[in-house]
Image (spheres, rainbow, N blue to C red):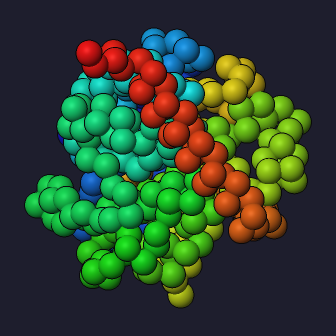
Amino acid sequence: MLLSPFAWSQKRADMSSGRVACRRFAGPGTYVGKMSPVRVAHVTDLHVGRMTPFAIQREAQNLVNAQNPDVVLVTGDFVCHSQLYLDQLTHLMEGFHAPVLAVLGNHDYWAGAEEVCQALRRAGVEILRNQHTTLTVRGQAIQIVGLDDAYTGHARLDRAVAGLRRDVPTLALSHIPEEADLLWAHGIPLVLSGHTHGGQITLARLHEITLGKIGGHKYLHGLYGSRQGNDNAGAVYVGAGIGSAVMPLRIGDRGKREVTIFELGMRPGHFDEHHAEQRALPGRAVSPRKLARRMAKVARKRERRANRRTIEMPSLP
Ligand SMILES: [Fe+2]
């Protein structure tokens, strides 16, 4: 059952738990009046593994389930440096009450994309790797486009949007937020993403230096662009994520662990939102050389895993 905006504001204090914020935004303005309300939950960067206590991922999941979303969309980085916690990942992903669709992130490629996909499929998660699918939610069709991880060079936009219908409400998922610029040009007014963890430490706007100036990101945390979807422009939401992969610290409002609810069919401005649409930072494009280095890193890690498996195999008589 959908909560009315009034019910939301009354219950707002209960909707964020101690360690995980629950934020709520309206969907694209272009869908207002063209569809009945649909509630989408967005989660990203779960990073199940040694650096994030499993209780935190469970806490995030409980927050999502408490919102009764129609669908849960996850934008990559399920693991943290290894395949040791894949059973735990499966166990976690089985616990969402709504259907789950997802794309992969750079950590999934570093740890082993095929193995991560197997763990997710065991839990019933639909993984979109440069493809799109159509869901029927509350009797209406919604297209979900999944762009594979651009950080490690696996994004293939043409394949992801091939055959996409412009007359059906559509959302896109991309681990890397800057890919939204290209997805908007295909008539997709809202892209959900992750990767930045919101900078994790956002006191004194530190994330604008670490992610923006040093990292070259245009989109750091939250909502950017416009949800009106005019002239092939659009919006992107960068979730702060749940887990960590480098350091476990999260300090500051924007770096807080987060699940995000999008009310499709509701007009932006219809209820209070955590923040307004923001303007992009200048950003810096990734050079072909840098991208080649990232792709080589994935290949190197895959080879190392294969070599380890060969050594571990018992020798035949
Ligand atoms: Fe991540």
* Residue 232 shows up from this direction: yes
Instruction: Measuring from the top left, give residue 276's x and y in whole percent.
Output: 64, 56
Instruction: Measuring from the top left, give residue 297's x and y in whole percent.
Output: 63, 46
User: Residue 219 appears in which quarter of the rendering?
Assistant: bottom right
Quadrant showing the N terminus: top left
Give the residue drawn at x 70%, y 54%: 293
User: Residue 91 appears in which quarter of the rendering?
Assistant: top left
User: Residue 248 appears in which quarter of the rendering?
Assistant: top right
Q: Nearer the viewer, residue 81 or 307?
A: 307
Position above or below: 93 against 216: above
Q: How many labels were placed on the picture?
A: 0
Give the residue drawn at x 49%, y 31%: 307
Horizontally, residue 136 falls left or right of residue 160, namely: left
Quadrant showing the C terminus: top left
In the displayed orientation, state which residue is furthest to the bottom: 231
Give the residue drawn at x 48%, y 25%: 308
Give the residue drawn at x 57%, y 46%: 298
Q: Nearer the viewer, residue 283 or 14?
A: 283
Horizontally, residue 285 falls left or right of residue 156, namely: right
In the displayed orientation, state which residue is furthest to the front: 317
Horizontally, residue 169 falls left or right of residue 287, namely: left
- Ligand 1: quadrant of the figure: top right
Instruction: Measuring from the top left, give residue 234's x and y in whole percent.
Output: 54, 72
Position above or below: 271 against 10: below
Instruction: Measuring from the top left, give residue 13's x and y in whole percent.
Output: 50, 24
* Residue 92 shows up from this direction: no
